[in-house]
Image: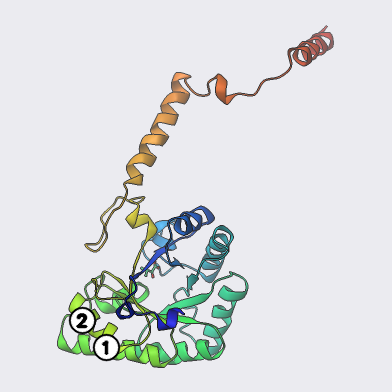
Amino acid sequence: MLRRYKVRDGEPPLAMVTAYDAPGARFAVDAGVDLILVGDSVGTTLLGYESTVPVTLDDILRHTRAVRRGAPTAHVVADLPFMTYQVSDEQAIANAGRLIKEGGADSVKLEGGVALASRVAAIARAGVPVVGHIGLTPQTAGLLGGFKVQGQEFESARALIDDAIAVEQAGAYMLVIEVVPSALVELVTERVAIPVIGIGAGAGCDGQVLVLHDLLGIEDRHAARFVKRYATLATDMRAGIAAFASDVRSGAYPAAEHTYKMKSSVLAELRDSLERERS
Ligand code: KIV
């Protein structure tokens, strides 16, 4: 069904969010999103890394299992982390297979265009649905000159279109495009039959994805221009923790309604027995 999904069919764009744990996945489903991504952004959102590079397959497996437990029927895409698919077709197929079999993902996502198309083809041939990811590819951002808008010059714009077509022809059923001018993404979206999900790529896509921590404002450090904050949870979280610490220090917590009672007869018997032991 998703393979045929194009906004020009008259449907609203797809809404995709990242999730890394069971509650996040449950909230996403309750909120009615179409797709959940267990992104390697878990490295920067939850694990305290500066980039996605250190994230391991075991990290993604653990978080994918948690997401699957929280959202048993959602469409879950799991990221293949850096260096879990670049080495060989065999490595890529084995690791993609683990995310499906052990993690419970429906499909895997990997970064790269023309250069990685043969890998997309190998994984898809092995029976694992693949999502491509082109434009700004965070795992190799260093090679792209950092976290910059991609495809602004003729050569790089042409290359992005070639990347999209190569990934589609290799058998990907969906494509994520990150931080690219909106006019360029419109050209891509028109030229591929698979759904194009944008992040920082404007409105001319078949769907949009954002990192949950960005859209909820769980992380309130610098955010990219494309991030829209729909909540300011970092402020609420700090205030909540500070109020708890203050209540503990003042004795306001725990109050009677937070404590458990014991029968007075049992307490009296216990006191007697302790008294007898002492004398
Ligand atoms: O890891 C992630 O969250 C992603 C999105 C930015 C698309 O790949």
Q: Secondary structure at mark 1?
A: helix
Secondary structure of residue under mark 2: helix
Label number found at residue 161: 1
Q: Residue at x 41, y 26 (%)?
A: 246
Quadrant in the picture for residue 73: bottom right
- Answer yes or no: is residue 22 visible: yes
**Which quadrant of the figure shows ligand 1?**
bottom left
Badge 2 residue CB within 8 Å of ligand 1: no
Residue 212 location, x and y as percent? Answer: 38, 58
| In-front residue for pair 190/279 | 190
**What's the image's color scheme?**
rainbow
Q: Which kind of residue does numbered mark 1 sit on?
A: Ile
Dot 2: within a 10 Å radius of its alpha carbon, few (fewer than 14), some, or many (20 or more) residues? some
Q: Is residue 159 left or right of residue 44?
A: left
Is residue 38 shown to the viewer in this render? no
Per the model, the C-alpha gap separating discs 1 and 2 is 8 Å
Q: Seen in the image, is 263 located left or right of residue 161?
A: right
Mark 1 or mark 2: name the one nearer the start of the chain: 1
Question: For this rendering, which residue is in front, 151 or 194?
Answer: 194
Residue 18, horizontal then vertical, whole percent: 42, 63
Do labels 1 and 2 touch, CB within 8 Å?
A: yes
Q: Nearer the viewer, residue 14 or 133?
A: 14
- Quadrant including the C terminus: top right
Residue at left 30%, top 52%? 230
Q: Residue at label 2? A: 184
- Give the farthest residue toward the front: 10
User: At label 2, which amino acid type do we have?
Assistant: Leu
Residue at point 26% right, 57% down? 228
Q: Above or below — where is 224 with respect to 119?
A: above
- Residue sitting at x 26%, y 78%: 144
